Amino acid sequence: MKPIYSPLRIEILIRFYLRACQPLGESDLVHPDSPAAREEIRNLGAEGAIMPVRHEGVCGYCTTPLGRAWIKAICNVPPPRQVWMDEMNRIL
């Protein structure tokens, strides 16, 4: 099954990408202990996008190469553009 990229999932992935090796409560998530956040963290870990780490006695998460690749893919999505089309789907 293809993963669903909810805004929460994307936010969590970005937070762990930017601030690796920090405890969950210090990762700047709005509600780090909410059931939804915990579920997304479990799912991202199961998919191999993040992994738990221990750095200087602190437990946290960091992105894996797969997670970093997702971040790069998200950042490389071109912005949408508005165009007018005729009834034959040709750009006017």
Image: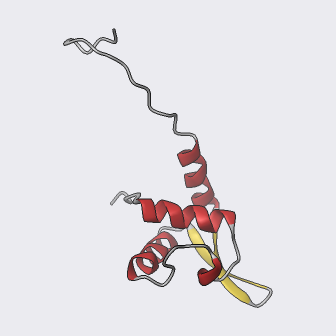
- Can you name the residue that lies furthest to the right here? 56
Residue at position x 34%, y 12% in the image: 91
Place of residue 74 in the rendered image (x, y in percent of width and height, measured from the top left): 53, 47
Quadrant of res 52:
bottom right
Q: Nearer the viewer, residue 88 or 65?
A: 88
Place of residue 83 in the rendered image (x, y in percent of width and height, measured from the top left): 37, 19
Q: Quadrant of the C terminus?
A: top left
Place of residue 5 in the rendered image (x, y in percent of width and height, measured from the top left): 41, 57
Decide: is 1 above or below 38: above
* Left or right of 15, for residue 86: left
Residue at position x 69%, y 79% in the image: 22
- Can you name the residue that lies furthest to the left here? 87
Place of residue 33 in the rendered image (x, y in percent of width and height, measured from the top left): 48, 84
* Left or right of 24, for residue 36: left
- Can you name the residue that lies furthest to the top here? 92
Decide: is 92 above or below 4: above
Residue at position x 43%, y 82% in the image: 34
Q: Quadrant of the N terminus?
A: bottom left
